[in-house]
Image (spheres, rainbow, N blue to C red):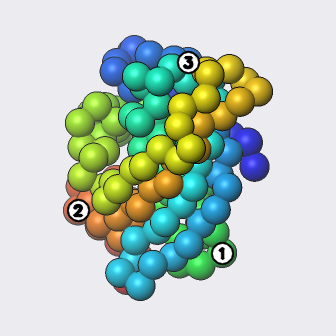
Amino acid sequence: MLLCLQTYGQETNHEKASTVSFRLKEVHYLPDSNIEMTITLYGVKKKDSDYHAKCSAIRLLLFEGVGTGLFSKPFLEEGEHTAFESHPTYFQDLFDVAYNDFIKSCVMEGGYKKADKEKGTSFHLVVRALLLRRDLEKKQIRKKIGL
């Protein structure tokens, strides 16, 4: 599954590139409600790759859902564009500063590959999925449902 995420609104730190292309390679649910995933980024400069890997993992949970388990449905089903328009301050803060609160680890695998659309750089991440969902509920971005 190759995904390209558009950015919306005013250009901020998280919108330096108009799109980020990445592929979700693997997903594993951990017993502590964290998600372990491997993502390959395409066309991203080395200095920006760590940031884009983390934000891509968060965007997957928010707007696509991952795997076949507890987090298979997106946290925000209204879609990325609608969510950004409805809560611009929350998402600007999330993707400028707070994203690190929801990433337990992020490790580049196999070294950086030249930033083009053919070769990708893979990252192994552990995302604090339940913490992210609870933050969305606490800040009333998402209605509290179950768990």
Task: Name the residue type under label 2.
Answer: Lys
The percent position of residue 101, horizontal first and vertical second, equals 24, 52
Q: Which residue is mark 1?
A: 68
Give the residue displayed 46% in from the left and 31% down from the top.
49
Asked whether 88 or 30 is in front, the reply is: 30
In the picture, the quarter occupied by the C terminus is bottom left
**Mark 1 Cα-neighbour bin, 10 Å: few <14, some 14–19, many ≥20:** few
Extreme-front residue of the structure: 110
Between the C-alphas of marks 1 and 3, the distance is: 30 Å
Instruction: Say left or right for 18 vs 52.
Output: right
Between the C-alphas of marks 3 and 2, the distance is: 30 Å
- In this rendering, does residue 8 appear at all? no
Mark 1 vs 3, N-terminal side: 3
Instruction: Say left or right for 14 vs 75.
Output: left
Between the C-alphas of marks 2 and 1, the distance is: 25 Å
Give the residue displayed 58% in from the left and 61% down from the top.
65
**Mark 2 Cα-neighbour bin, 10 Å: few <14, some 14–19, many ≥20:** few
The percent position of residue 5, horizontal first and vertical second, equals 59, 33
Task: Name the residue type under label 3.
Answer: Ser
The percent position of residue 90, horizontal first and vertical second, equals 28, 40
Q: Secondary structure at mark 1?
A: loop
Q: Which residue is mark 2?
A: 138
